[in-house]
Amino acid sequence: MKPKVFIDGESGTVGLKIRERLAGRSDIELLVIAPELCENAEERKKFLNAADFVFLCLPDEVAIGAVAMTENPNTRIIDASTAHRTNSDWDYGFPELSAEQYEKIRVSKRVANPGCYASGFIALVQPLVKAGVIPADYPVSCFGISGYSGAGKLFIDEYESAGRNPELSSGRLYALAQVHKHQPEMQKVCGLSKTPMFNPIIDDYFSGMVVNVPLMLPPPLCGSPLEAGGYAENIKKIYENHYNKNEKSKIKLMNSDGISFLAANTLADSDEMEIYVFGDGERILLSARFDNLGKGASGAAVQCFDIMCGRA
């Protein structure tokens, strides 16, 4: 029997992209609420409890309310909001963390979809913490750039409106006070004891992003298992073993030789992620390139759904 799937909040940016990915599939039954009833709590409750799988594409408080309304013990939920990403009762939807994480997602009733910037950060940092290259107390810093679609419908309308503010034509740094909703999951999932320094930039293009983590070696990474004189190559080997040798992984280490520029929109409309290791010696830059609406949001949610269905 085909699983019944309901997208609660399908008119939002992430919901629309999930709908696009599922619309042509013959292996599911997509439950669609009438547009005029999409904010009717009772009607939503009927759909939430009639579905085998639910995608929540809602503001945090509304997502929490939707979970409370879901009384069917067999309904399995994938939440794309921030609400449950550090909740220990939910499984974090990043199957590339480990074989154990993949298995948790496969049998889970409650999966929290990762944030977009957090996805790139975790892909770069978690394997190195796990390998002992980055100590848990290392002061990790991160900077990244994303298209404006990651900011939601209001910002999309602002960027695409006539007579807009000229400042929107340039990259704009935000989270200046070092408070961003992705930092808690970045810290927790990577096993860091300190909140990472995080400097995101929103820029004047629709989708795609690059997340970067700079490392200074060997101090303060004294005691690192990296071999002296070949730090970058050793890091590449860790990524190669972690991602490239995993046929189910959507993440791949790429060849960084000869690259002078790394455009952020190259993987727009893709569900893959590319990671790069630049530099050598004491200064190394780790970069993750992907689509903030793909592996950073809707693509990751559908990846988890396929794993939960036994299709990936």
Image: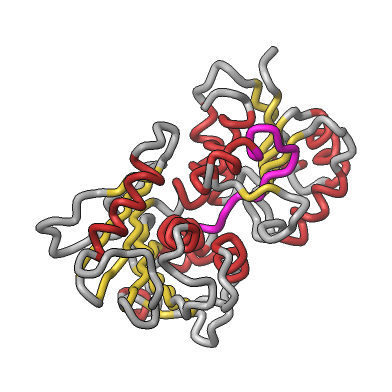
Say if residue 287 shows up in the picture. yes
The answer to whether residue 149 is visible is no
Q: Residue furthest left?
A: 258
Of 36 and 135, which appears nearest the observer?
A: 135
Residue at 27% across, 64% down: 227
Depth check: 294 or 309 in front? 309
Q: Is residue 166 above or below residue 159?
A: below
| The quadrant where residue 76 appears | top right
Give the magenta-colored segment's residue range: 104-117
Q: Position of residue 231 (x, y in %)?
A: 26, 66
Residue at (63, 50) in percent of width and height: 92
Residue at position x 75%, y 53% in the image: 63
Residue 203: quarter of image: bottom left
The percent position of residue 110, horizontal first and vertical second, equals 73, 43
Residue found 40% across the figure and 32% down from its top: 247
Q: Is residue 305 magenta?
A: no
The quadrant the N terminus occupies is top right
Would residue 158 be found to the left or right of residue 76 on screen?
A: left
* Residue furthest top in the image: 1
* Up/down of 151 relative to 137, above or below: above
